[in-house]
Image (cartoon, grey):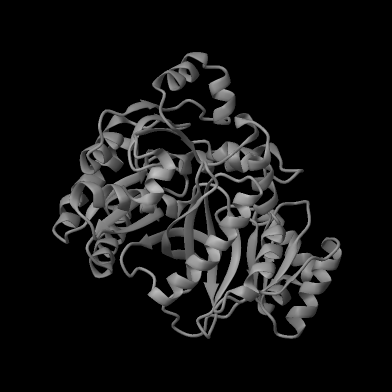
């Protein structure tokens, strides 16, 4: 058995609880209005559909959004799962912890199974203690940066971007303006944020077009790219140079129940601006030199997390500079989008043989809004076309197809990056083509 799989669930089918909203709620900025809070919860509930793959094999799923059985049946068929008990739609407008508190029979059912229980991340509902304290400490991009600065001297090939911590938003605006006047691009960060929220790359031209630092901050708050209150961090922008082969990468690992740190792997992340879109993992997805550097540094981070009482999944994210050095940017003390890709790869390698590359595409835009049945039919028509490219199509997030900006989350598994690229291009064209199909019906 792969070492990290044994440390994660003992190789057993597990209970998966999609508590993304619960985890994120811990870090909501004060002053968030009810409408923005509702939007954040809805987005988190879409992302919680990834709970199908919180381990290589589920026994029971708890999903906040309603998901039809055809979706989990599709995954079970391709991944050769045993029977999966699905409890969907438990918390469409609230957190999962609150929903479970009102469903004692479901909580009792989970306990009666006697299986490992895997969640997106640690919250107070699972008990206070050193693990939760470590989450609250190192999910901060300021505390993570301090740890990076401490560890980096022992890790050739790692360089930590400089970070400033202005004493207030007025001073942050002045520092942004001063940096822009020197022609410097700045990465503006809220201390806490997920999926790119709370992180903005500020080019000098953006700041001056907005009318200065204060005006830019007001615009970013109105656009819900930054929280309305709280401190801000100003970080040096790392320039990857032209035509960078590898820009954003991650290294995933976990701290087992005994405190031992288990490496999982490196992934090539797909990031649009500052927003995470997906990842590719598997053989040679990340060049060996970069993967080795990332592994050594991430494991050193894990040793520190373990010493402070953390147990569970984590990753360290990096960007690359012009000299191909790795610049660490944040620690995620929870499951991650890349974690799902590693779970899928482990399961496929187990049931079909080794060598899979897996690419997740968390929010592929659709050209039209589709009800669940129509979305399933659309993807089912694409499944054999992907298979002809030797690529397996796996639906992961099927609940956002009828949103104002419709999207679907998918995974692709195949033998090479070329095969994955071809399948992704096929899917992109087919999704875009939905717009034309509906135009023809008018």
- Work out whether 310 lies above or below 63: below
Tag count in the figure? 0
Between 350 and 248, the residue placed more toward the observer is 350
The outermost residue toward the left is 388
Q: Is residue 176 left or right of residue 113?
A: right
- Work out whether 164 lies above or below 144: below
The outermost residue toward the top is 105
Q: Is residue 50 visible?
A: no
Between 73 and 416, the residue placed more toward the observer is 416
Q: Position of residue 106 (x, y in %)?
A: 46, 18
- Work out whether 175 lies above or below 282: below
Q: Position of residue 355 (x, y in %)?
A: 24, 60
Q: Position of residue 397 (x, y in %)?
A: 39, 44
- At horizontal 68% and vertical 36% (from top left) the residue drawn is 129
Between 30 and 296, the residue placed more toward the observer is 296
Q: Is residue 277 left or right of residue 434?
A: right
Q: Position of residue 58 (x, y in %)?
A: 35, 35
**Location of residue 364 (image quadrant):** bottom left
Q: Is residue 198 visible?
A: yes
- At horizontal 49% and vertical 72% (from top left) the residue drawn is 293
């Amino acid at each position: 058995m792969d070492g990290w799989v044994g440390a994660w669930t003992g190789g057993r089918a597990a209970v998966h609880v999609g508590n993304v909203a619960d985890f994120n709620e811990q870090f909501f900025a004060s002053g968030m209005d009810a409408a923005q809070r509702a939007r954040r919860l809805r987005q988190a509930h879409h992302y919680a559909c990834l709970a199908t793959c919180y381990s290589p094999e589920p026994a029971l799923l708890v999903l906040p959004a309603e998901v039809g059985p055809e979706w989990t049946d599709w995954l079970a068929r391709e991944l050769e799962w045993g029977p999966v008990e699905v409890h969907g739609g438990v918390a469409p407008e609230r957190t999962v912890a609150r929903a479970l508190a009102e469903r004692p029979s479901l909580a009792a059912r989970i306990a009666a199974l006697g299986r490992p229980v895997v969640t997106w991340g640690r919250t107070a509902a699972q008990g206070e203690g050193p693990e939760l304290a470590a989450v609250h400490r190192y999910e901060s991009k300021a505390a993570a940066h301090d740890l990076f600065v401490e560890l980096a001297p022992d890790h050739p090939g790692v360089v930590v971007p400089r970070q400033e911590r202005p004493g207030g938003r007025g001073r942050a605006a002045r520092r942004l303006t001063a940096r822009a006047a020197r022609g410097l691009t700045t990465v503006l960060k809220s201390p806490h944020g997920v999926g790119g929220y709370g992180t903005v790359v500020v080019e000098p031209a953006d700041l001056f077009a907005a009318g200065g630092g204060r005006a830019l901050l007001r615009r970013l708050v109105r656009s819900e790219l930054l929280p309305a209150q709280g401190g801000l961090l100003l970080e040096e922008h790392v320039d990857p140079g032209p035509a960078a082969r590898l820009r954003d990468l991650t290294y995933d690992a976990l701290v087992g129940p005994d405190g031992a740190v288990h490496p999982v792997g490196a992934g090539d992340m797909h990031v649009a601006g500052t927003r995470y879109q997906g990842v590719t993992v598997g053989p040679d997805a990340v060049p060996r030199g970069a993967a080795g550097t990332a592994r050594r540094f991430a494991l050193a981070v894990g040793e520190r997390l373990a010493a402070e009482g953390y147990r569970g999944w984590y990753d360290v994210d990096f960007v690359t500079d012009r000299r191909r050095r790795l610049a660490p940017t944040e620690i995620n003390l929870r499951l991650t989008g890349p974690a799902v890709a590693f779970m899928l790869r482990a399961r496929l390698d187990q049931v079909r043989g080794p060598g899979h590359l897996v690419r997740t595409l968390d929010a592929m835009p659709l050209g039209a809004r589709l009800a669940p049945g129509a979305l399933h039919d659309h993807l089912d028509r694409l499944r054999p076309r992907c298979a002809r490219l030797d690529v397996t199509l796996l639906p992961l997030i099927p609940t956002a197809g009828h949103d104002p900006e419709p999207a679907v989350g998918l995974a692709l598994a195949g033998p090479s990056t070329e095969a994955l690229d071809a399948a992704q291009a096929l899917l992109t064209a087919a999704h875009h083509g939905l717009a034309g199909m509906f135009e023809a019906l008018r």
